Image: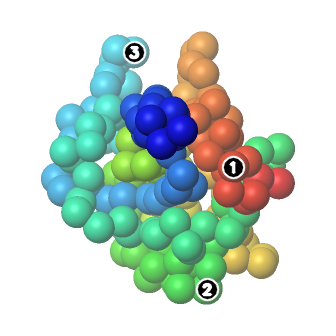
């Protein structure tokens, strides 16, 4: 009997099934990454970029515990008071913002820019403006011309939010 229990435990552990819930976090990057520009947009516009795990800072800017809800229909993220304050206190450059990566278990699933609330120049990417909406929510805006999949409803992100009961 012990033999069969050992076999079952081995199969379970080697199957990749995890007992810990996924962590959803927002990271700033160690350095500013080069930006994609297949359409030839002006260099002054903040454009899409592709971060790897090694590009992320060692600790999350917004921790998993700071992310309260995510509303897919309105593309709004609700944060804790401390998480909200971190974004409000950011001072992104007016021209090109601060790059971020929203991750699931430290794997980037959406990247974009924290944008200054006084900017008049949008990013050709995903944007979170450092201005607080009611109820500690922030809009995740998207300005991506052409046929791009919408990373705000990325399957990995939605699954992680659903598993942690934070999907609205």
In the rendered structure, the answer to whether residue 53 lies left or right of residue 48 reads left
What crowding class fits label 1: few (fewer than 14 Cα within 10 Å), some (14-19), or many (20 or more)? Answer: few
158 or 47, nearer to the observer: 158
Contact, mark 1 vs mark 3 (Cβ under 8 Å): no
Image quarter hosting the C terminus: bottom right
Query: Badge 3: few (under 14), some or many (20 or more) residues near its Cα, within 10 Å?
Result: few
Q: Residue at x 75, y 58 (%)?
A: 165
Q: Does residue 131 appear anywhere in the picture? A: no
Q: Which residue is mark 1?
A: 163
Residue at figure coordinates x 32%, y 22% from the top left? 37
Distance in Å between CA atoms under marks 1 and 3: 37 Å
Location of mark 2 (residue): 81
Q: Residue at x 62, y 79 (%)?
A: 80
What element does badge 1 sit on?
A: helix
**Mark identifier at residue 39:** 3
SS under mark 3: loop
Is 110 displayed left or right of 106 in the figure? right
């Amino acid at each position: 009997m012990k033999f069969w229990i050992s076999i079952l435990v081995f199969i379970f552990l080697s199957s990749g099934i995890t007992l810990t819930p996924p962590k959803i976090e927002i990271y700033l990057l160690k350095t500013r990454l080069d930006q994609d520009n297949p359409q030839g947009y002006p260099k002054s516009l903040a454009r899409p970029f592709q971060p790897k795990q090694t590009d992320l800072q060692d600790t999350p800017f917004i921790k998993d515990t700071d992310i309260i809800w995510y509303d897919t229909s309105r593309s709004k993220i609700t944060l804790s008071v401390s998480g909200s304050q971190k974004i409000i206190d950011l001072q992104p450059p007016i021209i090109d913002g601060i790059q971020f990566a929203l991750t699931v278990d430290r794997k980037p699933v959406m990247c974009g820019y924290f944008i200054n609330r006084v900017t008049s120049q949008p990013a050709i990417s995903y944007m979170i403006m450092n201005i607080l909406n009611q109820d500690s929510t922030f809009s995740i805006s998207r300005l991506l011309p052409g046929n791009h999949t919408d990373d705000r409803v990325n399957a990995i992100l939605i699954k992680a939010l659903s598993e942690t009961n934070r999907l609205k």
